[in-house]
Image (cartoon, rainbow, N blue to C red):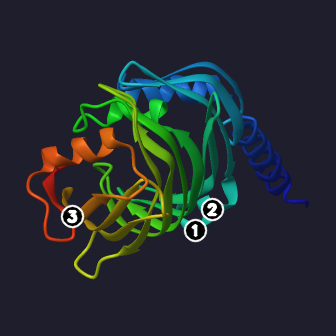
Amino acid sequence: MKRWWHYLLLGVSAWLLFMVWRFPAPVAYSMFVETAGQKLQAAGVDGTLWHGEAAQLQYQQRAVGSLSWQLSPWGLLLGRLGGELALYQGDGYLQAQGKVPLGGDEVSLSTLQGRLPLEMIQPYLTMIPLPLDGVLSLKLKDLLVDAEGRLQQAEGRIVWHQAGVKAPQPLPFGDLQMNIQSSEAGGIEGVISDSGGPLQLSANFTLSAEGAYQLKGQVQAAESAPKELRSSLGMLGKANSQGAYPINFSGSL
């Protein structure tokens, strides 16, 4: 006698797999909102749980941009969810590849790269009161972010192209860059330098695993810098014998 229930089990399993594979993204988003609250909201959600898009994403009632994702269900067999995310807003974009352990609190990103106009991220830079100008380009790898959104480790480079401030008067800085590496004590360390523009900058940046940061170094105006930049640097205090001003800022993110 044939064991017919084997075929029934195979058929039910295939049906369940098909349903999971085609699970609608709008339904998954509705379930997410019910459990995670209203901080993250999306409109125009389309596709499936594994491959879809949102026409508009908002975080804390701020427009973030459009989002697309492609997740791999096979990682579930290893107890993790991984895939690719892409965020677009105007001329800016952010792309990431990573994974999240099921039931875990940390997010691991193998790569993070993008191009972000400063006006796009200015609303999140609450510690900086001046309107910034320019574009950030970043190429990072091996990032680890904890459940509170704090960066625990990263490697790579961030460049601030055509850096400057827009007001109270336009001040150009030139291109600035920061090379990042993970700290042995947790968090990251960065070395900041200029690329030969109006602003000459040499500084070290540290960000602890708990979110405390410190920026320490010196800055001065190049010989070709406009007089407005030279006078603005005087607000930092007294220059040394080489005409450089010390900088030392600290706080918590």
Front in this rendered view, residue 155 or 5: 155
Q: In which quarter of the image is residue 178?
A: bottom left
x and y, in percent, of residue 209 in the image: 23, 64
Judging by the rendered image, the residue that carries numbered circle 1 is 78
Q: What element carries label 3?
A: loop
Nearer-N-terminus badge (3/1):
1
Q: How crowded is mark 1: few (under 14 residues within 10 Å), some or many (20 or more)?
A: few
On the image, numbered disc 2 is attached to which residue? 75
Q: Cβ–Cβ below 8 Å for labels 2 and 1?
A: yes
User: Badge 3 is on which residue?
Assistant: 243
Labelled pair 3, 1 in contact (Cβ < 8 Å): no
Label 3 Cα crowd, 10 Å radius (few <14 / some 14-19 / many 20+): few
User: Which label is found at residue 62?
Assistant: none
In the rendered structure, the answer to whether residue 140 lies left or right of residue 206 reads right
Q: Is residue 12 left or right of residue 235?
A: right
Name the residue located 33 percent from the left edge and 49 percent from the top edge. 149
